[in-house]
Every structure is written in C-alpha cells, then in structure tokens.
Image (cartoon, coloured by chain):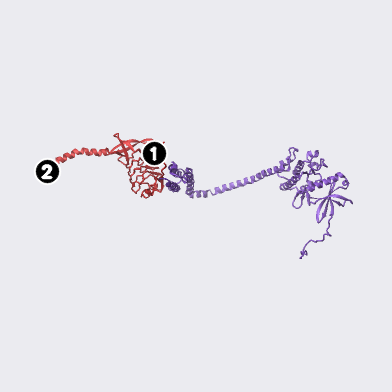
Chain colours: A red, B purple
Amino acid sequence: MKRLALLTLSPFFLFTFLALMPFASASAQKHNIVFTAPIRTDRGSVQMGFRMKEDSPFVATGYEEYSHPAIPATTEGEIFVPDSVVASDGQHRRICWVSRGSFQGCKMLTKVHLPHTISTISDLAFQGCDSLREVTLSDSLRIIYPQAFWGCFALRRINLRCPYPPLTYHEGTFEGHSLNTATIVVPFGSVDSYRNDKTFSSFRYHAEHIPTFPKRQP
Amino acid sequence: MNRPDDSFSDFETGTFEQLQRSFTDIQLINQTHTHQLYRAKRFGRWYLLKALQPEHRDSAVHQQMLLKEMEILMRLQHPGIVGCLGIERLRLPSSEEEAECIVMEYIDGINLKEWLASSPHRTSREGAEIVSQLLSALAYLHATGITHRDLKPSNVMLTRNGNFVKIIDFSLADTDTHTILKHPSGTAQYMSPEQKTASTPDVRNDIYSLGVIMKELPLADFWHRITEHCLLPIDQRYASIEELQDDIDRCKRRADRRRWMIPLAVLVLVLLAGAASIYKLDADKRAMYLQLNRIPIAKEQGLKLLEKKINATGLNHHTDTLTAWRYLDHRINEKILDANAFCYDYVEEQLTDFNDTEREEILMTLLDRWQAWHDTIVHRVKPLIP
C-alpha cells in the first residue's frame, strides 16, 4: 500500500519541483540588482554603485563583492552621499546601508558626508581610506560593523548626529591611532552617553555641538 | 665757672688791647701808570690795597675813577669776582702822606696769562672749567648791570687752592647808573671793535673779550664755532651770556653724544664679533640643544599660535559676559571647530621634519589645550540653554 501511494504521488512532486524551479532562480537574481547613479562631490560628480532587492524600497551603497568599492578608487576630495537615489527601474529609493567595502581603498577621499537615512555601516566600509579626514554620520545610524574605519590614519573629525552612540564591535571599529588624535563631535548634552560607550569612550577629544538660538524667519 | 683749658692750644691769644687793628706788612706788589697795588696784613689775613699813583692822587678825575671802582666792587658779591671791603685812608710805604686805598681780598694765585705760560700741556677739560666759571661770574656781573670792559687773561686770577677763577681790576668797568667817566676804554687786543669808539657800556663787549680769551685757552673742537660766534660783529654776536651758555650746552650735548657713539659702536662691534665667534664655536652645541628640544620647542610654538587663534575668536569674553541664550554667537561651533582644525593643520604643515610619533605627541599637546578651552566655553554656555 505504501509503495502504491509513493508511486502515485512522486510524479506530482516531480512536476511541482520542476514547475517552481524557474521561480527560485528568478528570486536569487532579483536580490542582486545593481545599478549606478551619480553623486555629488566637491569637484563635480562621480558614478556610485548601488545594490538593492527588487521589491525593497531601500538600497545599499556598493556592490556584492566587497573588494570592489562603490566609487572609483581614485575619487578625490569630498563626497556627499544622497539620502535617496533613482534606481534602474526609475523608482526613488532611500539609501540606508553602506555595504561592505563601499569606499574601501579610496585613498584620495578626504571627507564623506552620509545622509540621515543611513542606519548601518558594514565592515571594512572605509577601510584603507588613509586620506580621510572627516566623516559625517547620520542621526539614524544604529550599527557600525567591525573595522569599518580601520586604516583611516588621517581621521581628524567624526561628526556624530545621533544622541546615542551607535552599536559597535569593540574590536577595531576605528584605527587605533585615530582614537588618540581624532575629535568626535557629538550632539549637545550627549557627551556622557558617548563617554560611557566602550568604543567611543576611547576617543580622547570631543566637542559638543552647541545649539544656537533659532533665527527669526523673515 | 670752669674756664676752657687752653693749655694745649697752639695759638697764642692776647687781649683786645693788644690787637693790631691797622694794616701791617704793607708791600708793593705791582703798579701800573695810574695805580699801585699793595699787599697788607690785618688780623692775620692778607688784603690787597689799590691806590692811585702819587702823581695822580690829587687828580679829581682819578679820584673819581677810584671811587667808581670801589662803588662797583661793593655792589658785587660772587665767588668769581674779587671781593671788596671798602675804601680806607692809609699811609703807604711809598710816600709819607696818606692815600685813599680800595681794600680788596688778596687772591693767592696767578693770573690766566701766567697760568697758560706755566705749562703748555693744559687739557681741554681745564680750559672748559675756566670758561664755565668765567661765564658764571659774567652772567652775575651783567645781571647787576655792570660790564667789565677790560676782560683779559691778566685780569683773570686762578687761585692756588683749586684753580678757582676770580675776575679782578674793575677800574674800567662801567654801569648804566654811572654818568661819569664814560669813555672808550680797554686793552686793544681784547677790546671789541665797537668798544674803541662807543662809550655806552654793552655786555657784548665783554662777550667779545671772552671770545678772545677762549681762543687762547685749550678747548675741544666744538668750542671753535662758539668762539668765532663771540668774535662776530656786535649785531651778530651773542646778545647775552645766557645765549652763549645755551649754545655751549647744546654743543656739549651733541659732542657728548658723538663721544659716546664711537666707543659704543666699537663695543657693539666687538660684542657682535664675540657673539658670532661664540655662536660659531657653539654651533654644534646649539644644534644639539635644538635637536634635543625640538619637540618642546614645537609644542611651545604651537601653543602660542593656538592661544592667538583662541583669542581671535573672542569667545572667551563673549561667553564670560553672556546673559541669555538668544545672544549666543551663531558662529560659536564654527569658531570652536576652526581652532580644533588649527591644531591638525599646524602639525601637518609646520612639522614636516618630525616623524609620526613626534607629531602625534605634539598634536595631543595642542588638542589638550583646545579641549580645556572648549570645556570652559561649554561650561559657561550650558546653564543658559534650555
């Protein structure tokens, strides 16, 4: 009896498997949609690579392979990552992820401004940017993965907008040298939060961004 | 009552009855064609007695001259002018009759003519001292309205006890108040050109005579111009002793400055040469010092510049006097971060000869100072922010 049931149902299973296989491959291909879009620099613009899920409203900077930075490695000066970008399908999508190795090895970058939409900075995102002096992180930043800023020997200033320190992995988020000489700029009244953080407490110098009286609107 | 014991005294004192009140030891010491000069002692002190020559003693003119001289001398009281005690009728050795004598102080010394002749190696300092005393006496003389009119080296005495100057022989002196015996007079060589014709006394006559005397005195080079100025025609000559004195002072100051400039310049050159040689010798030591102290020196320099930068922001005063949040400088964050950036720029741009470790050390010193300043600013501002 059991043998009869198995013999009767197996074509059904076979048919189902064969029928779904195209869909499965189709889904794997949709996860790896990549495209490029121009972003502003202080010297004009540069093409930056983004990746996204087809049905996702969010994109991440960078490509799948972390050894390949999102922008040309010879990019110089200051870059301004926008908060959203027009994807290949013509839809606006928010940029909320700096993926692994997005700016890895960009030795000529001096300043990077990340939008307020970025919540995650992946590991090795800025690894080896040894001319990077200043980075502005968003107020939505929640996590920085290990060695994100490893090798950034020239780092002078880290502008932190979030009133609470983002989650970090204590092992080498920032280059050891930077901890002695870089200055973190934190929101007013959040110094104590950062001083109690295991990563950010290692920074020797800090500045509080003092709020000024709102200017009267004309 | 105890009397003072004078048994150990060297002086023999007599009584008032034994006191010799008249002149004694009268000796003729000099004479001219009109006058006789005697030295005489009274009360233990020598005096000079000036009398007319016997042939002129009956002459009313000469008597008036003697009287005029006495009156003029009695008006004068100055250490540079011979003192006069009055006129007395005395019996002189040269004649049996008594004669009127001007009694003056006896000057123990030699006149300027003898002084110049006694030694050719007189210094300009001595000459200048004589001129200075003459000027003092003449200034006094002219202030009393008297001109000497016969100023010459033989009428200038130098005392033995310190070469103090005393002007003598006022027989030709004149004043505005005397209306008699006004005629051109003087010694030709020392007489001003106008004095040969004019009878009106003028202080510039004495200035001319003084100029002639100065030509004979040993004086420094800068006196040459002053002397020549004394000998100019009357309307170009110094108008008064005060004017002459002012010019002398001006020239002295200029000469003093010049006198010190040369040795000072030499000294400076010597010092510079010495410093240069020491510098050269110690160049290695200096280099070693600089090398050993390069980090502290760089730190000190950086801190000085940082302080300047901080002061330039004006935030210290601004926050110290801040009363409300609304008045807070809108550029406060920019200024604070500019000063922060300065620390990095200084190290990167000025300390290219230092290695990374050294630069990090210096940078941290500057950032420590910046941090302290930042904390002060925030501490002042925080209470005002809601």
Counting from the top left corner in percent of width and height, residue B59 is at 87, 45
Q: Amino acid at mark 1?
A: Glu
Q: Residue A108, image x and y in percent?
A: 39, 40
Q: Earlier in the sequence, mark 2 or mark 1?
A: 2
Residue at image mark 2? A5
Image quadrant occupied by the N terminus of chain A: top left
- Decide which of B144, A126 is in the foreground and name it: B144
To which quarter of the image does residue A213 belong? top left
* Label 1 sits on residue: A78
- The quarter of the picture where the C terminus of chain A appears is top left
Q: Residue at x 57, y 48 (%)?
A: B275
In this image, A67 relative to B171: left or right? Answer: left
Amino acid bearing label 2: Ala
State whether residue B33 appears in this view: no
- Is label 1 in a helix, a strand or a loop? strand
Helix, strand or loop at mark 2? helix
The answer for how far apart the CA atoms under marks 2 and 1 are is 69 Å
Q: Is residue A136 left or right of residue B149?
A: left
Q: Residue at x 12, y 42 (%)?
A: A7
